[in-house]
């Protein structure tokens, strides 16, 4: 029972829930893809797992609609990184924050276009979103301790 209580308590955290959804989504995508490609007799199960994976991914996208404020507060607190001693790390961090600030609205516009809330080309916004995400990952890798 203690394990169940700890699990329930952990899942109340947005970060833990996001990690679980991401892990389950990637596992479903991996297993589903392997089943579709390698096991013709199990391809229906594989397709279903790929649908579940897509739903987990969609869930994470919708949950990120609420991350803007936290990201804005973090970026505002960091500012121009004046407390950072290394100028290279400082400007990498500022550029990373700007990239992340742009990432969220682009994803929201793409999502809203897919949901038919906005009449814009979602493919263009998803491409821009992916480019910003990639840049953010690269900046994070260069900036990693």
Image (spheres, rainbow, N blue to C red):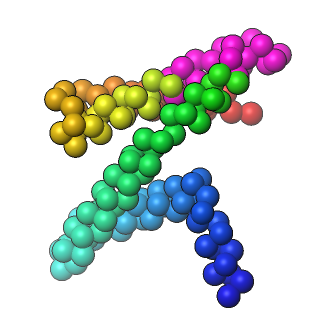
Q: Is residue 19 among the parts visible in the rendering?
A: no
> Is residue 89 on the magenta stretch?
yes
* Residue 45 x %, y %: 24, 75
Task: State the residue in front, 138 or 136.
Answer: 136
| Foreground pick, 60 / 141 | 60
Q: Residue furthest bottom?
A: 1
In the image, 59: left or right of 137? Answer: left
Which picture quadrant has residue 130? top left
Q: Quadrant of residue 35?
A: bottom left
Residue in view at x 68 percent, y 17 percent: 79
- The majority secondary structure of the magenta stretch comes to helix
Question: Whole-percent x and y of residue 142?
Answer: 63, 27
Residue pictured at 74% horizontal, 33% vertical: 145
Q: Image height check: is 82 above or below 15?
A: above
**Residue 132 visible, this orientation:** yes
Q: Picture coordinates of residue 84 (x, y %)?
A: 79, 18
Q: Is residue 88 above or below residue 70?
A: above
Identify which residue is drawn at 29% across, 39% down: 111
> Which residue is located at x 36 percent, y 34 percent?
107
| Image height of 58 relative to 137, above or below | below
Q: Quadrant of residue 40?
A: bottom left
Residue 52 on image: x %, y %: 31, 65
Q: Is residue 90 left or right of residue 35?
A: right
Say which quadrant the N terminus sits in.
Answer: bottom right
The magenta span reads 78-100
């Amino acid at each position: 029972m203690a394990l169940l209580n700890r699990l329930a308590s952990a899942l109340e955290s947005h970060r833990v829930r996001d990690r679980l959804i991401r892990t389950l989504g990637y596992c479903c995508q991996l297993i589903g893809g392997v089943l579709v490609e390698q096991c013709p007799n199990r391809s229906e199960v594989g397709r279903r797992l790929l649908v579940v994976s897509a739903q987990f991914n969609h869930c994470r996208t919708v949950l990120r609609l609420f991350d803007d404020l936290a990201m804005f507060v973090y970026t505002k607190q960091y500012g121009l990184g004046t407390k950072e001693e290394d100028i290279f790390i400082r400007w990498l961090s500022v550029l990373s924050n700007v990239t992340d600030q742009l990432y969220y609205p682009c994803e929201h516009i793409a999502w809203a276009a897919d949901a038919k809330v906005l009449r814009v080309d979602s493919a263009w916004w998803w491409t821009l979103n992916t480019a910003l995400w990639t840049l953010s990952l690269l900046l994070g890798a260069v900036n990693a301790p």
